[in-house]
């Protein structure tokens, strides 16, 4: 009996060794999808494209902080310790350890990676609309990289390949001039391959690609090139200024004639603070809202991003945009009987463009699921960018610049500007501030035109033009990257 057991044990060991030496045991099909085996149909590409679009919704933070970092608004909130990262950016005392800056970095790179996933496999499967799909993916990659360059300057550049775990040890920061070069290539391809009109709201169009390309040129002071491409958007006939400015930012007037590119939000899916970027709603709208509000039209929020008196006073007498952009809560309460509470740094004003309206589904958390779309590129912005480009290009065309500027002013029921040269430049800058207040552009306008140090309290030239690379990202890259100057 013992002898038989010994032989059986030996046979079992031999069998085990034989199996262990074979590769057959690894040839087991996984029940999960493999990214390498994806992209076998047009539907696969479209699904991946929707995922790349999805990170646009996280840019609510870029918009809100673009105002708070400028001289347009204060951080606000409940107290001086309410979201410390936001308070630090408002006071120009932010450091490389800042959760909101890390959010912008990681969320924008998540968008880049999702776009690059499509482009990594762009040649795998053919279908009739593939060039258009690739055009949308390349626009999205350009959009996310443009945000990264605006905020952080030189950033790691990955083209047509995802950044995989472990590869961060071999990737350097790319000079922003090279990143801009890739942005331009992507947007030129997109403008050549996208239709002027999309059947689905929110999809990228030829005009959106051209407008962002013009903006990228403007940020590099390449004014002649910016003027040329922005003229194409203006002369396309696809866009116009909305006749009734008072309806511009209402939820029932989204994706209108003035919308060149609009980030779509929904109130159909709930959200929580554990994953703000997962929200399908516009989180900034809840953050901007009136604290403990009870009354008509609006809903409550967290009273961040409150406009200052200076920007209220920047509007000329008779400018119809003022009451659309700025809510004077004291006057509103006196008129309607509404009640509210005051938060930290209360100024008496709120960003009326992007505070929550009554009438949505109030899906929980209601403050994080507001359906207000972000008008990322408006036709008025295109006109003012083109006005600046014509005024500042080597062979200035002030007549064309004034025509574009006055088109915006006339809609606001203001008289024509007749200035030329540097006086006209200042008038365009002023018009951009009041036309686009609350929309996240002002800080970057001040930086790119060299006016930030004279306008923003605490701004240090040579430092605050850029935000710091999050320190954890430098550590994860093996401490190979140099930090931005001053941090």
Image (cartoon, rainbow, N blue to C red):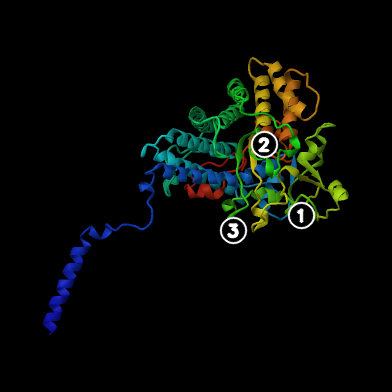
* Residue 426 seen: no
Instruction: Kindly check if marks 3 and 2 are in contact, taking CB atoms under 8 A apart as contact.
Output: no
Q: Residue furthest right?
A: 334
Q: Which residue is mark 1?
A: 291
> Element at badge 3?
helix
Foreground residue among 407 and 466: 407
Q: CA distance from mark 1 to mark 3?
A: 22 Å
Residue, x 49% and y 50% (percent of image)?
A: 476
Disc 2 versus disc 1: nearer the observer: 1
Residue 444 picture location, percent across and down:
66, 35
Q: Which residue was labeled with disc 2?
A: 441
Mark 1 residue crowding within 10 angstroms, few (<14) / some (14–19) / many (20+): many
Q: Quadrant of residue 4?
A: bottom left
Marks 2 and 1 in Cβ contact (< 8 Å): no
Q: Earlier in the sequence, mark 3 or mark 2?
A: 3
Q: Position of residue 333 (x, y in %)?
A: 85, 50
Camera-side residue: 367 or 309? Answer: 367
Q: Secondary structure at mark 2?
A: loop
Within the image, what quadrant is residue 396 found in?
Answer: top right
Give the position of the C terminus as an image quadrant: top right
Q: Identify which residue, 97 or 237, lies in the foreground.
A: 237
Count of numbered tags: 3
Q: Is 197 left or right of 158, judged from the image as shown?
A: right
Q: Which residue is mark 3?
A: 274
Spatial CA span between label 3 and label 2: 28 Å
């Amino acid at each position: 009996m013992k002898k038989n057991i010994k032989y059986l044990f030996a046979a079992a060991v031999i069998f085990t060794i034989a199996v262990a030496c074979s590769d057959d045991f690894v040839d087991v099909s996984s029940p999960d999808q493999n990214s390498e085996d994806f992209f076998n149909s047009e539907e696969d590409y479209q699904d991946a494209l929707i995922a790349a679009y999805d990170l646009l919704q996280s840019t609510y933070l870029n918009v809100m902080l673009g105002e708070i970092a400028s001289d347009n608004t204060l951080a606000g909130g409940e107290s001086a310790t309410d979201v410390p990262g936001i308070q630090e950016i408002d006071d120009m005392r932010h450091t490389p350890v800042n959760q909101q800056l890390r959010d912008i970095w990681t969320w924008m790179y998540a968008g880049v990676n999702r776009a690059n996933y499509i482009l990594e496999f762009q040649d795998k499967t053919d279908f009739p609309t593939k060039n258009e799909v690739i055009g949308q993916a390349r626009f999205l990659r350009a959009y996310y990289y443009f945000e990264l360059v605006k905020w952080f300057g030189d950033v790691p550049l990955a083209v047509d390949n995802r950044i995989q775990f472990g590869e961060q040890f071999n990737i350097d920061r790319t000079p922003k001039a090279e990143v801009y070069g890739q942005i331009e290539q992507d947007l030129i391809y997109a403008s050549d391959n996208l239709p002027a009109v999309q059947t689905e709201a929110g999809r990228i169009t030829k005009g959106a690609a051209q407008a962002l390309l013009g903006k990228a040129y403007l940020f590099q002071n390449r004014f002649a090139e910016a003027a040329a491409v922005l003229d194409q958007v203006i002369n396309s006939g696809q866009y116009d200024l909305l006749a009734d400015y008072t309806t511009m930012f209402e939820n029932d007037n989204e994706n209108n004639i003035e919308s060149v590119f609009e980030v779509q939000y929904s109130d159909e899916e709930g959200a929580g603070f554990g994953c703000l970027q997962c929200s399908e709603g516009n989180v900034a709208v809840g953050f901007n809202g009136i604290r403990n509000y009870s009354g008509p039209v609006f809903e409550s929020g967290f009273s961040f991003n409150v406009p200052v008196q200076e920007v209220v006073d920047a509007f000329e007498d008779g400018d119809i945009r003022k009451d659309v952009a700025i809510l004077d809560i004291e006057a509103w309460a006196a008129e309607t009987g509404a009640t509210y509470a005051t938060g930290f740094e209360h100024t008496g004003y709120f960003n009326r463009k992007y505070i929550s309206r009554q009438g949505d589904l109030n899906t929980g958390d209601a403050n994080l699921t507001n359906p207000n779309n972000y008008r990322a590129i408006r036709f008025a912005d295109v006109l003012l960018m083109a006005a600046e480009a014509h005024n500042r290009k080597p062979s200035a065309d002030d007549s064309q610049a004034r025509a574009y500027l006055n088109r915006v002013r006339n809609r606001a029921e203001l008289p024509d500007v007749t200035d030329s040269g540097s006086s006209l430049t200042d008038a365009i800058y002023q018009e951009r501030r009041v036309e686009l207040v609350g929309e996240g552009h002002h800080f970057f306008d001040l930086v790119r035109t060299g006016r930030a140090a004279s306008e923003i309290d605490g701004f240090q030239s040579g430092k605050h033009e850029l935000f710091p690379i999050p320190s954890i990202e430098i550590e994860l890259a093996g401490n190979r990257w140099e930090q931005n100057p001053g941090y």
